[in-house]
Amino acid sequence: MSATEITTAAGTASAVTPRGAKPKSAFAPRNIMLYGTLIVFSIYYLLPLYVMLVTSLKDMAEIRVGNVFSPPVEITFQPWVKAWSEACTGINCDGLSRGFWNSVRILIPSLILSVSVAALTGYVLACWRFRGSEVFFGILLLGAFIPYQVLLYPLVIILREMGLFGSLWGLVLVHTIFAMPINVLLFRNYFVALPEELFKAARVDGAGFWGIFFRIVIPMSLPIFVVSGIIQVTGIWNDFLFGVVYTRPENYPMTVQLNNIVNSVQGVKEYNVNMAATLLTGLVPLVVYFFSGRLFVRGIAAGAVKG
Amino acid sequence: MSRARSGGARARPPIRLFRNFSSKLAAIPMVLVGLGVFVGGTIWTIVHSFTDSRLLPRLRWVGFDQYERLWSTRRWLVSIENLAVYGIVSLVLTMCLGFLLAALLDRKIRYEDTFRTIFLYPFALSFIVTGLVWQWILNPEFGIQSIVRGLGISGFNFDPLYNPDLVIIGLLIAGLWQGTGLIMVIMLAGLRGIDEDIWKACRVDGIPVWKTYVVVIIPMMKPVFVTALVLVTSGIVKLYDLVVAMTSGGPGISSEVPAKYVYDTLFTRQNLGQGFAASTMMLVTVAIILIPWAYMQFREKRQ
Amino acid sequence: MENSIEIKELKLAFGAVTVLEDLNLRVGQGEFLVLLGSSGCGKSTLLNCIAGLLDVTDGEIHIQGRNVTWEEPSQRGIGMVFQSYALYPQMTVEGNLSFGLKNARVPKDEIATRIARAAAVLQIEPLLKRKPGALSGGQRQRVAIGRALVRDVDVFLFDEPLSNLDAKLRADLRVEIKRLHQTLKNTMIYVTHDQVEAMTLADRIAIMKGGQIMQLAPPSEIYNRPVNKYVAGFIGSPAMNFMEGQLEAAAQSFDTGRGLSFSVQGYEFVGAPTSGPVWLGLRPEHIQSGRWADGQPVQLEALVDMVEPMGSDTQVWATVNGQELRFRMDGQEPVAIGDRMPIGFDPARLSLFDKKTENRL
Amino acid sequence: MKKTLALLASTSLISVGSAAFAVDLEVTHWWTSGGEAAAVAEFARLFNENTEHNWVDGAIAGSGGTARPIMIGRITGGDPMGATQFNHGRQAEELVEAGLMLDLTDLAEAEGWRDFVNPTSLLDSCTLDGRIYCVPINIHSWQWLWLSHKAYEDAGVPVPTNWDEFVAAAPALEEAGKIPLAMGGQPWQSNGAFGVMAIALAGIEAWEAVHIDQNAEVAAGPEYARVFEAAAQARAFSARSNVQDWNQATNLVITGQAGGQIMGDWAQGEFQVAGLVAGEDYSCLPGLGVNEIISTGGDAFYFPKVNNPEVEAAQLELASLMISQEAQVAFNLKKGSLPVRGDIDLAAANDCMQKGLEILATGAILPDANQTFSPDTQGQIEDLMVEFWNDPNFSAEEAQRLYVEIIASAD
């Protein structure tokens, strides 16, 4: 009897006060865990950037006595100046500045050519399939897995036969070739996801291969161009191997100079100059990331995930 | 109007090649790169792996000699083992970490943009830069070890780059730092593509969040995982710059990798035949992994 | 130029898979032809072949007397409307309408006139400066129709144009398309899987299955005299009742062999009737019940299993001597599960199909 | 100076008198450390001052291992540089065979290189089928032990005068918190140090048997067993030197953190740049103080064929200049290496260099390993050495066994 009463009482109580946990406040244990984990990971990811920055602002005396994580006692920009314009490789002492402009001269044509070729190829594969086109696509994808070293030598021969070896255009071509697999995949997947009927409507409207590409497809493809562009900017800018193998010294990109500065130790390793040089070299892709990160995620969602 | 223009209607089918001629024209770069560079280059490499080419390629056949030597070379065996260890651990960790971070970011948190940028920015930096920075942080005299010792724990030892048994860990720390961001973005994009209703259904069914991820969400994201897998694997096979920048294969030969063996034999040792044999073996390995996958993809499409 | 469109021996195959085979079709000048069928029957494929969006494997396509088999879509004198509207998202409505004309190098003032006329017909003048993203589904489809309209062509192709719209809009736009056809008097080919659209719009319907045209006839004939069991079952809602049984040619009687038999006298046979196993089709709306069953040539008694009141009428699921039957009765008549009631029908409205070939007898 | 000018004049006679045409001549090399860069700057200065032409510096940092592939790629890729550095020996053999290198025989005969190059074996390694294809520019010898006086003073022991004393003094250094032997992590350093110990401890006969006759039995014998034992000992001494680059290791010696380093004579340049004085701040023991002998490796310049008479003339002028007395003196003083000419006076050379010159004069010389082994065999030995040197559990016996295998299949 009393047992029944208790159940009833409990039942009544539960009818009055809502059941379940209350909506979480900002400091609920779950949130603390969530943000805690994120912050711990952020430290791991930010640490190197912090170390680079701090070290590049110290002078060598301070580096020798302090630890890598302590902030600079006295901020000096000398390492940056030295990395940019004074550091020596062999008998050339003009720092990274020369390489920077070389990298720009390599980047722009390579970027334009590699992205346009990839976009065009992706367009053919998505919208104008022909007998065997899928086979070629398969070959391209397999190409993504071939270690660069395997093709280094055959490419020397190909470029030599074309008379492009050592020229800027040879390097542009190499970048375009190695960019093809992954970028064609991105573009193709993105274009395949575009509504097929749009493409049909344009054909009925009398637009041809190029008309559809330029008037219909490209205006709809900003996100994937951003993704491909970002991947290419970082890839081309950060390249060392191709730059050093396929060009001559007057065209050496910035990374080659970075390697020269970091590796040509004259006396003591100047860590501060190395770090400044490292940061300077990474600056262009970093800036590109910080400004287009959001578009990047959106483009990845559209191009890489489907299909 | 359009009728007037094309009075002489074509009644016969045009030659196949010239139908949509522009598209065939636009496919030329793909055909040239695919056949000329990837297939051609690969065949060229395989053919020359059966020769005794030294500095310059020449066709003097030696059968399988290069392969016999390759598989009796300690450095190659160590390289393969390293790549296997690094590859498996890095693949698993990159996927897990990438997914974890993406899942955390997908919990409708504040400052998502900031966190995402923090996780992604290392991807903008080259392996050369990555290697340098981590070499610096892991340096026992300046980096983490000396800091912790400075805090009073004098017995603390953490010098992965100078310890043959730990050097792979050093590489992993740097490799994961650089590579997880991209995978996180891909996973995040995949998570965003999942229907909100799925989440609602799971909440109504009372399935805990972690279980929803494991049982419902991850199986739904199969294509995303495949994309991520392709990206990570193709990167692992090519692992080279990071090792060169961080350890140069050292200490000793404890962090050597196949790509470095290929590069060194081809160019430094001036033994093309041997280098080509090694790169052929790398290709074979890739093919063993890829062909079943490609076959499965192909069969799925058929059905 | 009697035929607007003529298709001869059309064949389409993708590798080993044949999608269309030996297909012949003639569409008259100003005719509204509906291609009807369930998904995968080849109706959209056929439309795409007519439009030139798919290259045929064999056969010929003539439009307005011209062999256009290998013409570019834009050169065929067609306009096309798609299910997903397929509006160019980055162009305004005006840009969408003018895109094809610009490609055909039509003079500017001519473009303006045509857009103005199309916009007036479709009542989309206020939308001209907007982009498709800012339009509702119905508005988008009007623009899509407008895009076909401005091309000033003789043949309009519609590929399930109303399928993405909700029920009410669909009904409104259906009427509008019909009105458009009456005004313009163009030849129209309209693909749909919705039999209501087909019945209401079509001059003739082509019912397709497995890449072949099963029956090509005006809606009433399709409804009343389906050529085979598939067409009979496909058209009509609720679907036709089918009974398996034996036909006695001499006695003109039907027997299910399970205790139900009745005379089919009054049925118009296609040829001479022969005895044998048959399918007998009877549309639910052709069965009279209750007091209306009186006076019908065939009279039976039904046991009510289930009732679906729909307001205007009620659908009844019943059993007659072990044979399941559906029929409709007036919505106001009282009926309950377990009721027994008389039903009746006229054999003239039956359909009989050979058991084996499933063709009409 | 007069002689140089005369030589230059004779060069221009050969080179069809087109020297008046200024050419930008790109010179690639891997000299980027302090002393090296200063030395190469001397070449550049002389070339720019004494000719119409222009030295375009193509330095590639890292080491020969990084730079050589790039150079070879450029030459075989049909985009050759004006001149490029290689080590003496067999590195460029196939390029020469393939006819990619300029034949310098006429110039060498006109200037009489064979008369003054000392030892003449240097010129031999530039010669293929009687034709000369490269200019030897310096002699580098590996057989040096560099010792920091400060380190030994701090430890309170006298500076050793040979390897045995060095071994004996090691524990004292350890106690004083010093690294007895500084050692960089790069493979060629491990290999080089082993080579030095082999010559010093196994003796010349055994060394020649292994290197020249490729006699695997000798390599398996007791002389070499001793070398491997000593190397294992040296490995223990160097365990704590956490540096990669050779000059980082040298820096440990310069600053007195390490007792000594086995390194070639190029380390000399680093001591010099740091302002240290030989005999006072540091000392050097050729042949580890055991066998006073030096190997005559070194650098040579090759001139790829360019099929352009003007550039070719400039190449010949550079070749002539590099071997001229003035350039030899200026370059080698900065580089810390020995000149290839027997007819110049190096009074300006310091203590250590003088020692080297004396040994050279006595003819106690051996070819360099680069001259006796192919790069491939060298590479295999490097792999073995770097593993041995970095793994304390790698026994001397096991290392010797693997070494014998390599020698047996060497080419």
Image: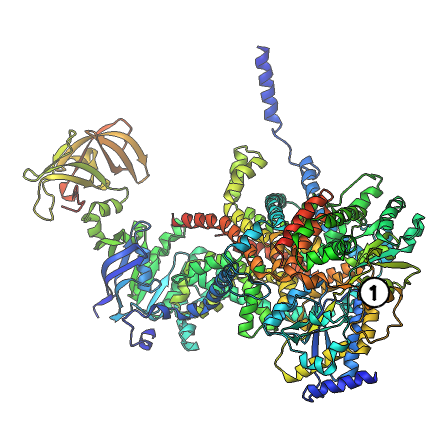
- Compared to residue C248, the image places residue B253 above or below, namely below
Q: Which residue is mark 1?
A: D359
Residue that sits furthest to the front in the current view:
D205
In the image, taking residue C9 as reference, residue B232 lies left or right, namely right
Colour treatment of the image: rainbow
What's the chain of the residue with tag 1?
D
In the image, taking residue C112 as reference, residue D64 lies left or right, namely right
Q: Nearer the viewer, residue A221 or B180?
A: B180
Residue B17 point in image, percent of width and height: 36, 69
**Could you classify mark 1 by the number of other residues whose Cα lies within 10 Å: few (under 14), some (14-19), or many (20 or more)?**
some
- Compared to residue B172, the image places residue C80 above or below, namely below
Quadrant of residue C147 in the image? bottom left
Residue in view at x 33 percent, y 65 percent = C52
Amino acid type of the residue that numbered disc 1 sits on in the rendered structure: Ile
Residue D168 point in image, percent of width and height: 87, 46
- Compared to residue D147, the image places residue C111 above or below, namely below
- Compared to residue B55, the image places residue C339 above or below, namely above
Residue that sits furthest to the top in the current view:
A1
Q: Nearer the viewer, residue D364 or D231?
A: D364
Q: Looking at the image, can residue C36 be seen?
A: yes
Residue C194 point in image, percent of width and height: 32, 50
In the image, taking residue C114 as reference, residue B289 lies left or right, namely right
Residue that sits furthest to the left in the current view:
C250
Q: Nearer the viewer, residue A54 or C116?
A: A54
Q: Nearer the viewer, residue D385 or B85?
A: D385
Q: Looking at the image, can residue A114 be seen?
A: no
Q: For numbered disc 1, what is the local secondary structure?
A: helix
Residue in view at x 34 percent, y 75 percent = B1
Residue A264 point in image, percent of width and height: 76, 63
Residue in view at x 69 percent, y 52 percent = D218
Task: Tell how many labels.
Answer: 1
